[in-house]
Amino acid sequence: MDSLMPIGRFSRASRLSVKALRLYDAEGLLVPARVDPASGYRHYRPDQIRRAEAIRVLRMVDMPLARVRQVLDLDSPDAVRAALAEHRALLAGRLDEQERMLRFLERLINREDIAMPYDITIRTIEAQRVVGHRVHTSLANIGQAVGEAFGGAMGAIGAARAIPAGVPFLVYHDVIDDQTEGEIEACIPVAPGAADGVAADIPAAEVVSTLHRGPYMEIGPAYEALGAWLAEQGREPVGPPREMYLNDPNETAPEELLTEVQFPLAWK
């Protein structure tokens, strides 16, 4: 019992904050060897420092807590090696994306021409039934949130035994930036009358839209073009913007992705 370390001493030895240790205890990642029943004070064994260090490093390379737990629970070196290789590939993909964004920012800041022109179109979209799933997110986590939102929508469609029947799209209900979190909603069209109880009927609307070709993270100039048009025409959007995803990112090179950006307008 004397060899147990109180949480403050363990924090200094493991280089994990007391706040982090409490979180990892709650998540089942690093459970204290003993918790005093009267005071609630946590105590750790010295040999738990190695697990604490593994958690600290895995979090430094941006591995989500749920995945950290899975990796730490693996029971063979080969399984651990495979899990780390998978995460390494994920980080490499993120690095490629960030390098692409830096090249895009250089063109943007230097006022170089954006490769594709943005033609503005006004058209009417028909009423449709969709299954949606909302997620609250920060800007830093928006990529993960988009995946979660579409996963939730597809799960609801599957549970309702319905079939997707149109172009999936994302609705930005709030302006999300580095200071402000907000809600996004993934919407997947289904057939009229399908998915009762989980689907919503969206009325017909007039929209102003433009087509973006290229990586999703370089879509800013499309919004700039639509904003300029709205200002020139003295029109105001009457609802949040939508991004319609016209091809599959799993089967399409980033440079060939097609996204239609829409703002709903008041009927004239």
Image (cartoon, helix red, strand yellow):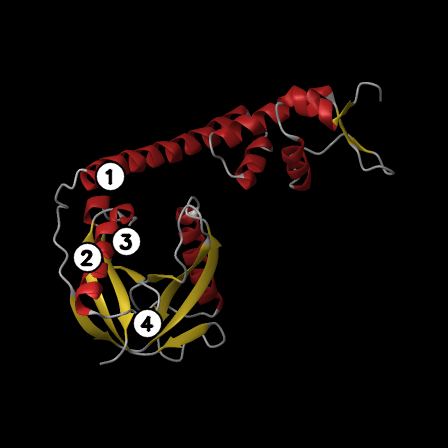
Instruction: Tell me if 49 is positioned left or right of 90 in this view.
Output: right
- Gap between marks 3 and 1 measured at Cα: 25 Å
Q: Which SS class for mark 2?
A: helix
Q: Residues within 10 Å of mark 4 (few under 14, many from 20)?
A: few
The x, y position of residue 138, in whole percent, is 45, 49
Q: Quadrant of residue 1?
A: top right
Instruction: Give the answer, above or below, for where 27 lies relative to 228.
Output: above
Tell me the residue that label 4 is attached to.
238
Residue toward you, 123 or 191 = 123
- Gap between marks 2 and 3 measured at Cα: 24 Å
Instruction: Tell me if 92 is positioned left or right of 251 in this view.
Output: right
Instruction: Tell me if 111 is positioned left or right of 250 in this view.
Output: left
Label 3 or label 1, whichever comes before in sequence order: 1
Q: Nearer the viewer, mark 2 or mark 3?
A: 2
Going by the numbered disc 2, the residue's amino acid type is Ala
Instruction: Tell me if 139 is positioned left or right of 9 in this view.
Output: left
Residue in the image at 61% along x and 23% along y: 15
Tell me the residue that label 2 is attached to.
225
Going by the numbered disc 3, the residue's amino acid type is Asp
Query: What mark, if any, has residue 105 been given in the picture?
Result: 1
Residue in the image at 66% along x and 33% along y: 21
Going by the numbered disc 4, the residue's amino acid type is Val
Q: Which SS class for mark 1?
A: helix
Tell me the residue that label 3 is attached to.
248
The x, y position of residue 217, in whole percent, is 29, 46
Q: Which SS class for mark 4?
A: loop
Q: Quadrant of residue 51?
A: top right
